[in-house]
Every structure is written in C-alpha cells, then in structure tokens.
Image: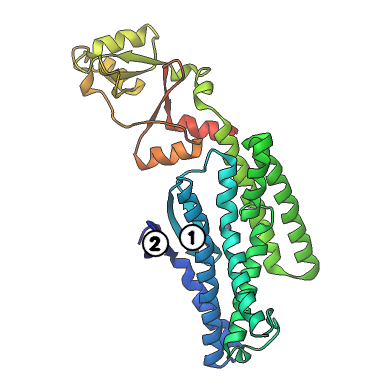
Amino acid sequence: MINGSIHLGTYAGIPLRLHWTFSFIIFVVVFAGLKDNREYSEIGVAFLLVLIMFLCVVFHEYGHALMAKRLNVKTVDIILSPIGGLARLEKLPKNPMHEFYIAIAGPLVNCFICLIIGSILFAFSKPIMPDLNMNLDKVNNWATYLSLVFAINLVLFLFNLVPAFPMDGGRILRSLLSVRFGKKKSTDIAAFIGFGIALMFIIWGILNSYYTLIIIGVFVMLMARGERKSAKQEDFLLRNYANDMDEVKVGKVYNDAALMKDVIEGYRDKEGRNFLVMDENTKIIKGVVTEESIRKAINEAAEEYAVNDFVTAEYYTAENNTLQGILNEMKTQNAAYLVITDEDNEQYIVERGKIFDILDKL
Ligand code: ZN
C-alpha cells in the first residue's frame, strides 16, 4: 500500500495503482442493484460494465503516459479512483507543444477504440449506438456489449475534450494558448473559460435537477482555481524575491573546521543572519548555521567550539520548482531551511515558515 493504493501491475515501467476508495464503486453497484430488486445476473452485468469502463480509462491514461515517455517525461504512476484515472507526470514539459501531445494522446486512444468497434459493428450490420434506456437483462450478446463499449469510449473522448481543467481539454487549450501568450497568461485564460463552463454545468444541473452535473461543476471550479495558483507560483521567482528580504541575508564560512567565533563575529557585523558552511575549494555547501544556533552559541559562550558542532544539515537546495513543490520536497526531506542560489552565485537562506507566508500572499 502506497498512499492508500494497491499496486496492480507495471507496464512499460509505469506502475498502475488502484486507490482504496475504488471499493466504493463495488458497494454502490451492489447496493443500488439490491435496492432495485435486480437479479444477480443483472448486477453482474453492471459490474462487468464498470470494469470495462475502467479498463478503457486505463488505456486512456497509458495514452498520456506513453506519449510522455516518448517526449522524455517520466510518469510516476497511474492511479485509478472512483472519479477516474490520473497519470501523474514527474514534471510538466517546458515545450507547450509537448504538453499538447501528452494531453491529446489520452482522448485519442478512446477515439481509436471507437473507430475500431464502430467498424466491426458496421461490418456486421449491428447498431453502433446502444439503446441507453434498455434493461440490463438485454445486455446478453456480443454486439450489445460492443455497442456499450463504443458508447463508453465516445463519452470518455467527448467529456475529456471539454476545455476545462482537470479535463484534458483544459490542458489542450492551455498548451495551444501558451505558444502565443506564455504559460501564466494562458493558464489564466484557460481557467477563466473552464470557470464559465463549470458555471454552465451548475446552472444546467440546478434547472434540470442533475445533481451529478452540479458536483462536476463545483469540482471543475476548484480545479481551475488550483491550476491558476500553481501557474502563479511557477511564475514567481523566489530568488528575485529573496533579494528584497533582509532576513534571508546569508553569511559564509568557507571551512568546516572554523570556529564559532568567526560566525558570531560575522553575525554581529550583520554579514548575515544565517551562515552557510562551505568547502573552501569546491564551494560545496556542508550545512547551515542558523540564527537560532548562533544565539545559542553566544549564550553558552561557545566561541571556541567548531562550527561543525552547530551546523545543521536540515536544509534543501531548490532547483527549478514551484513554491508548493519546494515545500513538499522540504517536508519529505525534513528540511527546515531552504538555500537558494541566484544567477550571481549569491545565496539566500529562507526558513520554511517564511515560504508559507509568501504562498499565502500569492
Ligand atoms: Zn486524460
């Protein structure tokens, strides 16, 4: 079990996981079936159709993942939950056209399945679209099953093309806009359009008592908001901001055999509030002496102690990452301090709490 999901298998190096909440679907199908006094065979058919639908979702997600692989973007895993599938990419491609190819690959898989099944049914002169009001006991021959698979894939194809996050259509729209407007502005435009669509879903849902549509609308609105926020964070350069922050000013000690009195002297001369201990030759960071431990050293009259006794390794050096990404990484690495290096090779040390403050203001 990782993050509440079980590993089903791995294809092309991409693990497929099933989230535990998926078991709700089994309960819902069985419960709804028993409540309506359905035959066991009908519940079985409903169950089989749910399985087929999720198999099609798996194909869809592998469409994204395999295209990403072709474009050298790693997929961490594919997670199946009751609300659908998600191929978690390690990072978003920098090239907007690559984002476009990855986003459209999923719906194209469903389109491809529709074409194949549609051709088979057409060749055998069977109806391609199923009667959506038919009783489940009518689902008893291959042609009806195939027509239902056709309908499932048609819905997956069309629904995912709706231009609103988190549907693929939102990403397709954003990536196409990005070619011209850049990522942040494109995300704003795409999120705005998605917001409008979500509002239409909700109004339509209220007028016609389609509760599912209302829930989807609210969900889409929340996703649009999240997407805007992360684009804003990505656009925000912490190191430029750090330039203006006095409290992140950093002093340097180029020797881990140095004594605390050097650091304390630098602190009193306001060289910095936190100190980086670095290797003299390689300039590789060995650790951080924080303001807190400098104060402690002053209180304990520890001037003659080695800086090594006061150095903490609980720091994280950010490469290009979003603020939320940095925070997540710091949490996993249990790092209380962030070390950033700007273009002029100047370093800044930011406390984790400070990043929360910045995130709140964005
Ligand atoms: Zn998709």
Circle 1: residue type: Tyr
| Ligand 1 occupies quarter | bottom right
Q: Is mark 1 within 8 Å of ligand 1?
A: no
Task: Estimate the x, y position of residue 28 in percent, counting from the top left.
Answer: 55, 77
* Residue occupying the far right of the picture: 207
Identify residue for label 2: 11
Q: Is 17 left or right of 212, judged from the image as shown?
A: left
Who's the residue at 58% across and 90% down the image? 141
Q: Quadrant of residue 255?
A: top left
Task: Estimate the x, y position of residue 324 in percent, counting from the top left.
Answer: 49, 39
Which mark sits nearer the N-terminus, 1 or 2? Answer: 2
Task: Estimate the x, y position of residue 243 in percent, counting from the top left.
Answer: 51, 17
State the SS at label 1. Answer: helix
Question: Would you say residue 360 is visible in this rendering?
Answer: no
Task: Between residue 146 and residue 253, name the one nearer to us.
Answer: 146
Task: Estimate the x, y position of residue 291 in percent, counting from the top left.
Answer: 36, 20
In which quadrant is the N terminus drawn? bottom left
